[in-house]
Image (cartoon, coloured by chain):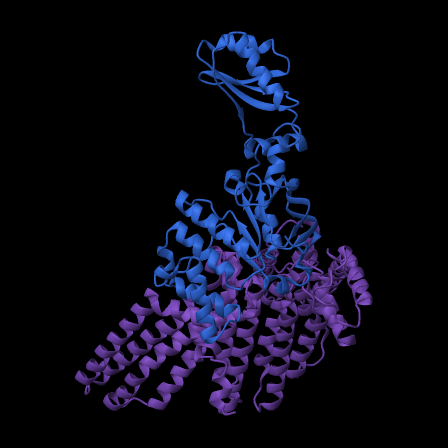
Chain colours: A blue, B purple
Amino acid sequence: MSQELVLDVRHLRRSFGKVHAVQDVSFTVRKGQVVGFIGANGAGKTTTLRLLATLDSPDAGTIEVLGCDATNYPEKVRARLGWMPDNYGTYDNVTVAEYLDFYARAYGYVGAGRTRHVDEIMAFTELTSIQDRLMHTLSKGMGQRLCLGRALINDPELLLMDEPAAGLDPKARIEFKNLVRILSQQGKTILISSHILSELGEMCDTMLFIDKGRVVHHGSSETLLRGDADYLRLEIETLGPVDRLLAWAVLQPGLTFVESTNRGARFDFAAKEQGDLAQLLRRAVQDGIPVCDFHRLERRLEDAFVEVLKKSNGPVPAIPPPFKP
Amino acid sequence: MNFITLFFSDDRKLDDWLSPILVKELRQGMRARVFVISFLLLQLFLIVLVLGNVAAQDDRSTLEFQNNFFWVILGFALLGLMPLRGLVAISLEVKNHTMETIMLTRLTAWRVVFGKWSALFAQSLLLVSAVLPYVVLRYFIGGDDVVSDFEWILFMLWMSGLLIAACIGVSALGNFVIRIVILVCIAILTLTAIGNYESIGAGLDNAWEIVAWLAVFGFFISAILFELTATGIAPASENHALRLRLLALAFLLVAWGLARLAQSDFTPGICIPAIVLVAVCYFDLAEKPRLLPRMVRSMAQRGWPGKIAAIFLLPGWPSALLFSIVVVPFAVWLYCATAKLDPDPGWLLPLFSTFGSIFTPIVICHFFWPRNKQVLLMVFIYNLILFGLGSILGGFADLTHTPMNKVLAFLPGLPVFFTGLASDSTKDYTPLCLVGNAITLVILLFALLVGSRRYFRELLALLRSAPDVKPSPDQPVPEAEIK
């Protein structure tokens, strides 16, 4: 991955009246990275993305896209970025091909070169077969592909996507993920916002968590999943009554009850090494607990996110009501 | 290289020379049900009309009725249907979130607005071209004056273009009341402009004077309306205040030039651009200031004219304030000079009142209600209240012969309405209102100038620090410069 900075955001602030949508957001993105921009509804994702896309101006702070100041030279920045909003607008009486043709014209493509470019975009986003369909008759998945096609029409170096997979069926999501993967392989830098973490886990190199307009974590999904927790989560199931398992667990050092399941319970276990885990299982068998399942639980991204929030805010905050800028 | 290779080289086609918006809008518009149905209905109606003309060839009154009906239908299509489609041209794009994606392309706000207008006007032209064969046919059947018909059709096209511009012009404004107010004002101005046919008809004998006046009026009003719309959708980095103010000023100067050239009394012709200039001041004074270093820098690099322009022509009320202080008296002076009016202190009253009616709501909004986003609406409401108050006081003063205005003479803007409505000839309210308004105006101006001190301090600092060489866009801008 290149070390070239594509995005350099410093101390970004944006308020709407009393609502501080973005408060002191700073981060950098390098060329070729796929960055997941995650936060609850109203956390400030869309506002930040709109600022990056030069659709809004910050109250304070600087945005540099490929070394170019976005506030003072928006037209230079716009030429090098692609914007995919969460709700793309449709036109009545315009076909898929005409829609892309219009944007190609608007970006300065002319003549046969334009037609060729539009054809390439339609082929990439698998829209060729529906190029003569009126765009207001498209399904959500087709519409998102069209929107992606439109965002790619100027061959942008930076692609900003706001909730691109929201409302898509599983098949369309997989198709969309594949497109993102190909774009990433082509060397495009991509910033994808979502409030569904599982959606981004597989796609992104790094995650940028935002809450109440502040960045609360910036790192890879692996580091987030690993976290800095000093315990493992275990699930133990028994054949007999669960009460016996719970009574046994109270006596075990380092084992803390978390929650009951149908046939057992989940625990946090302060293990220093893998051997501690083997020893715990041996003890359970020796003490006559009829263990039928004993496994370590993988930490979910959602849990990791909640933990990050806990650390940054104390108790988990209630999700603020969404605001409309 | 011949003409053909010049325009069609580089594998460009004819439509590559058209605005992308025009191409899109035409594709969209020609498929729109409103256009298709109105086009087909017009054709059907014209066929019926021609057949009717043939049947009633000897009946003069039926022919006349059919003739009137023809103009009503054509007028409805050109002056009703087509402009009304412009009323949602921009607002629909904003509502559907398509305007943002358009603004991210190379298209500027002005090109988008002009493209929208061109598309609707092209459709008006298409309707007219469909009507032309019938006009010729009517000449052969009914013996109508085909030249006069063509003149009328051209005039209707002019009106259609102007009305489309007006409807597109207000379509970017969020507030419905403001949209209606502006449309009504434009209608009044247009009627006045056309009315000048009659009122200055004594002087405007020459056809060129009429054509020149209509061309100047149509061009400037449309261009100002396009700028007004572009202001609503353009990013903050595009300085539309500069073009809007310069256009309004140019309108006044061109109208004045026309007055000098024309042999007729052109006083109303000066009055209209003066009103437009004041309206532009209203609009710009309602705008919040935003100092973009890049904008100031690019102006400063043009030497002292650029620096002066930065003081008077940047977006926001502080620079609009200075602009108003300079150009409004100039407009009034130009009007008085053209109308050959004797210098009279009484003329200061409308000037003070105009300033007062602009500045009072601006002071209220910017200093006491800064969160209010509908400053323009406040200006309108304030003047509406004054109009109501002026009407009541005018009527009351007439009835009771009591000088009710002693206290209210200090209320800026009131005398404009009051003195016009009070027909009591026994009392001259002018000196009292003049003094009252002058005092209030000084206070208002003082408040506005004090309020804009920080803005001008920052502007001057930027102007002083502007480098002589234009900085590269890739050069990072110091953080402190981003306000």
Q: Quadrant of residue A211?
A: top right
Percent across and percent down for residue B473 are: 70, 65
Percent across and percent down for residue B379 are: 61, 58
Please say whether residue B88 is visible from this viewpoint: no
Residue nearest the viewer, comparing A303 with B143: A303
- Asked if residue A314 lies left or right of residue A263, the reply is right
Please say whether residue A28 is visible from this viewpoint: yes
Query: Would you place residue A244 above or below residue B255 in this image?
Result: above
Total number of numbered discs in the rendering: 0
Q: Residue at x 56, y 43 (%)?
A: A323
Query: Would you place residue B340 above or below residue A183 in this image?
Result: below
- Asked if residue A322 lies left or right of residue B45, the reply is right
Residue nearest the viewer, comparing B6 with B250: B6
Percent across and percent down for residue A292 are: 46, 16
Q: Residue at x 55, y 21 (%)?
A: A234
Percent across and percent down for residue B85 are: 41, 66
- Asked if residue B305 lies left or right of residue B73, the reply is right
Residue nearest the viewer, comparing A93 with B105: B105
Task: Name the residue furthest left.
Answer: B55
Query: Would you place residue B109 above or below residue B374 in this image?
Result: below
Q: Quadrant of residue B282?
A: bottom right
Query: Would you place residue B119 above or below residue A2 in this image?
Result: below
Question: In which quadrant of the rendered image does the C terminus of chain B lie?
Answer: bottom right
